Amino acid sequence: MNLQLLVSGVAMGFIYAMVSMGMVLIFRAVNIVNFAQGEFLMFGGYFCYMFNRQLNLPIVPSLLLAALAMGIVGVIFMFTSYWPLRNAQVRAIVVSAMGASIVFKEGARLIWGSIPVTVDRVAKGTTLVGTAVVQWQNIAIIGISFLLILFVYLLLERTFIGHVMQATAQDRYMASLVGIPVILSIALTFALSAFITGVGGGLLAPLFFLNNTMGYTTNAKAFAAVVIGGFGSVPGAVIGGLLVGLVEAFGGAYISTTYQLVLIYVVLVFFLMFRPQGIFGGRIQEKA
């Protein structure tokens, strides 16, 4: 029982880690929290459904195509919801992202309908580990998510493109002075954010039916993971996502599935009280 909960909690934690990592990438690039990040997950799942069930493609190519499609959606989102308002007040950009979230939800309902749908599993069946029954899909989620997170880390830390993206995130003005195409760098960041989140949607779809409202709850959990891990920290987003997944799994099993989100926010409040900067965040100082 505990091993089964551990595997499912870690699997869900990796899904939240990818969503929160995408949120952190955008936050580092433009200093704005993207409250439409959960809709990236939902839309990625629907794209996977379109390729897998409507166009009858195998699940692995469907996942790849859905992720690439979400990369394009991320760029469109950046040019429509952020770039025209880049010099406006932060609240205007936040409201724009919230409006985009509504557009994503209603757009999914108009395109694919309001009836919940699903996709094929990457790995079917279950395996017995001791006395615990573990779904192969959960193991596939852990493996694929880990490789994708590792890919993002290596891209950011070991490649020229990653260094360009990080330089733009640190100081856009100085980056432009040394010849870095700032708009292209930010667009790549949005594309990468939507790409990894879209993969999470395709992996999650076989376990939970897709619907156009699933992004809201996922966004709330991913935001909690970002705060717990430390705003702006990619490793913090991963650790925070795993912690949220484990709290959700064990809290739902031993307390109540009804209060899973409440339990997650109880943990969030605990961190805000005793470590407000998060696990990997820097020390917060009061302003004079």
Image (cartoon, grey):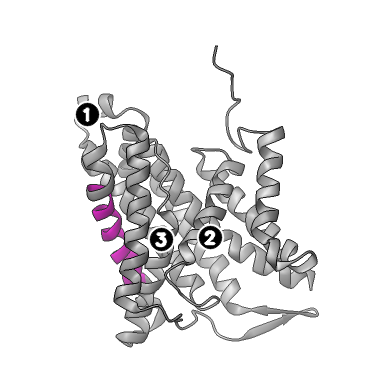
Which residue is label 2 attached to? 217
Magenta stretch in the rendered image: 64-79
Report the number of numbered marks.
3
Q: At 29% across and 29% down in the image, what residue appears?
A: 172
Which residue is label 1 attached to? 176
Q: Is residue 116 above or below residue 81?
A: below
Left-right relation of 158 to 144:
left
How far separated are the C-alphas under marks 2 and 3? 10 Å
Mark closer to the chain start, 2 or 1:
1
Q: At 38% across and 67% down in the image, what residue appears?
A: 44
Q: Give coordinates of residue 49: x percent, y percent.
A: 38, 79
Front one among 54 and 288: 288
Q: At 49% across and 55% down in the image, what residue appears?
A: 219
Q: Give coordinates of residue 146: x percent, y percent.
A: 53, 60
Which residue is label 3 attached to? 39
At label 1, the amino acid type is Ser
In this view, the mark in front (1 or 3): 3
